[in-house]
Amino acid sequence: MKLSSKAQKIYSEIDKETTKLGDLRKFAKEIKKDHELAMELWSTGKFMPRQLAILIMDKKCLTQALIDQLDNDIQNHEFNEQNQLMDWLMANQLSKDKRLIALIESWENSPSKLQRRVFWYYQARLRWMGDTQHSNTGKLLDSIEKNLMKEEPEVQWAMNYTAGQIGKWQEEYRQRCISIGEKTKLYKDEMVAKNCTPSYLPEFIRIEVAKLNN
């Protein structure tokens, strides 16, 4: 796609190593919603322009077919960029609309690993402020116990994180979540920076529960 002059100007300003997420948010605040411009920026295939595109998309235009197209495009990025783009899409667009949330909730067994990641990360986000009023918690843990070690790494992380949030906030499920980590040993040998919480479930839950009790 040949870029319009407006898209080319923005692209030239943000496709730089010095561009920060805060800079993108400033651009998005000025542009507001502009789906056509978003698709132009998306067509560049570049990471920062695509992040800005996500911020200015019109969620009313996001269908399963378009999301599948975006998903396929995202999979051309390197691993960390894939996860950042898909998580950014979820946080800024997909989780803001009841119709799109219904799509997220249908993705547990999606053929797309990135859509499966969104399913699980969304479940974690529902719980991470202490909201425990969800009827599917037991079912989610059943699925985690059965499928965690069969999944792709990006999906594993989101499933594990969901178990961590459940174990943190719901005492009745805590030991079950700890046992998942003890059994799978997933992330047990992970090295984390100082003051960062490890992903290994027994340690994650111990540290996070201790924070609640302080």
Image (cartoon, helix red, strand yellow):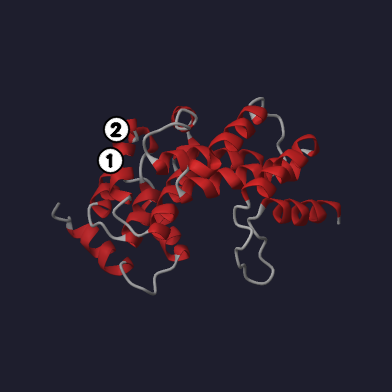
Give the percent coordinates (x, y) of residue 25. Answer: 45, 58
Give the percent coordinates (x, y) of residue 63. Answer: 33, 31
**Left or right: where 5 falls relative to 50:** left
Label number found at residue 69: 1
At label 2, counting other C-alpha atoms closer than 10 Å, the crowd grade (few under 14, some 14-19, many 20 or more) is: few
Relative to 82, does residue 141 appear above or below in the rendering?
above
Residue at the spot 72% in from the left edge and 34% down from the top edge:
132
Asked whether the beta carbons under mark 2 and mark 1 sit within 8 Å of each other, the answer is: yes
Identify the amino acid type marked 1: Gln
Relative to 67, does residue 196 appear above or below in the rendering?
below
**Is disc 1 placed on a helix, strand or loop?**
helix
Relative to 111, does residue 36 appear above or below in the rendering?
below
Label number found at residue 65: 2
**Left or right: where 200 falls relative to 44:** right
Give the percent coordinates (x, y) of residue 201. Answer: 68, 51
Give the percent coordinates (x, y) of residue 213. Answer: 86, 52
**Left or right: where 193 falls relative to 1:** right
